[in-house]
Amino acid sequence: MWILLWISQVSLWTLSSATVHLDVVNQWNYLSFDLPYHFTYASEIRLDNTVFTGLEISDDRIFIATPRLRAGVPATLSTIPRHVPPGSGPTLSAYPSWQLHGPMRGNVNCSQLISVYRMKMDSCHRLWALDSGVMDSLDEFTRICQPKLVVIDTLTDQIVRTVIFPNGVLRPSSLLTNLVVDESVQGTCDSSFIYMTDTAAPGLVVYDGLKDQAWRLSHPTMFPDPDHSDYNINGETFTLMDGVVGITHSPRLATVYYQPLATDRIYSIPTSSLTKGPPAEFESLPISLVGRKSSQGIALTCSPFDNTLYFSPLQETSVASWNPLSNQQHLLAYDSERLQFLTDMRWQPDGSVWCLSTRFQRFFLRTASSNEINLRIIRVPTHFHTLDDINNDLIYK
Ligand SMILES: *[C@@H]1O[C@H](CO)[C@@H](O)[C@H](O)[C@H]1NC(C)=O
């Protein structure tokens, strides 16, 4: 059984643009980096190729991943301070240090970070950064290093663990882009299970942190659907055949939710079928269709308290929620300017959802301009309960 997750054009017309509650935490035209003195490659930096796709939040810092989608991205993992004036655009500092970021070309040192799409914090204040090892993934697609997980203790900013993935769990075009750290199965931190999305050779890679073993699963639901590979955002259209990339987890329901980019569907799989070890040959996976959305999306996040799933239909430039237990659906925010192409979302304990809004379509089509705001961190409160609540709020403003 599956349900239709609405957000139709009709319901959006009842909302006027740019009025629903959301807070702009930070915003930038282009990102700027705190370059070390005498940075060798300063003239090769291409901020028009530098777009963030990964967000993580600690008490005092915001972590940002800028993958090397094209040439000229100075650092692939950075931080900004969390407590800065709303709407400011702080300079990014390479994390954990510039020494850990390889040059944009030339000599490669695979101990350094090559291209990180996303990272997650565990309960020991450690950041699990997933490094795809692929340079220029939108253009040349060159895997220059094996993909790896780099675990950084954010209290000391030291690397405490590195896991390098062997070819056995990869395919020639593998691109590891997103992850869930599951601390609910066999313990926290080093005992976690990590579930990772392979977007270009669609599948999931599972890593058992206790046994230090990894394996791979694949299923047709992880592949892109050619009928949903065109994206129209504010009148600009581009095509991208990307497989599974959105992933989140409900520890209480022991369920992982995922979505390819090029699809209108969200799927789920019980964590027990991920953690039990490599699937047997011809084994069928217990995958369920969770629902259909009005359009494609990348980011997914889940409240660990009430299991509400948050997602963002790209073409409707909105944030919506669905609770699989109560079947309640809500449109939380719609804003054609400030909610463009969300590349990551993170539920926060204060009941808000933080979003990376990117105008990715403009970076992709090379139409981004340094004179306009292109990148935002947005905080969306989730306390609205129904579409009527949002409308009432607009009416009585
Ligand atoms: C590679 O990078 C690591 C981390 O920055 C560093 O410790 C190591 O010395 C580098 N190796 C070479 C050969 O440069």
Image (tube, rainbow, N blue to C red):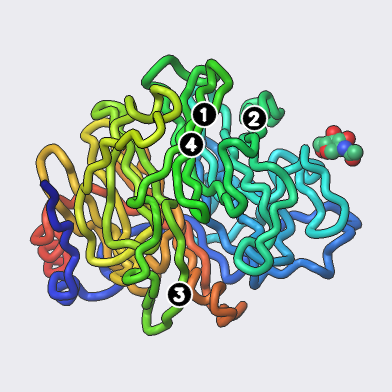
Q: Position of residue 340 (x, y in %)?
A: 40, 68
Kindly check if marks 3 and 1 are in contact, taking CB atoms under 8 A apart as contact: no
How crowded pointer 2 is (Cα within 10 Å; few <14, some 14-19, many 20+) is rated as some
Question: Which amino acid type is shown beneath numbered disc 1?
Answer: Tyr
Residue annotated with mark 1: 207
Q: Earlier in the sequence, mark 2 or mark 3?
A: 2
Task: Give the residue at x 61% y 35%.
Answer: 149
Residue annotated with mark 3: 239
Secondary structure under badge 4? strand
Ligand 1 quadrant?
Answer: top right
Q: Position of residue 344 (x, y in %)?
A: 44, 52
Answer with the quarter of the image where residue 4 lies: bottom left
Residue annotated with mark 2: 163
Question: Which amino acid type is shown beneath numbered disc 2?
Answer: Val
Alpha carbon of mark 4 to alpha carbon of mark 1: how far?
9 Å
Residue annotated with mark 4: 216
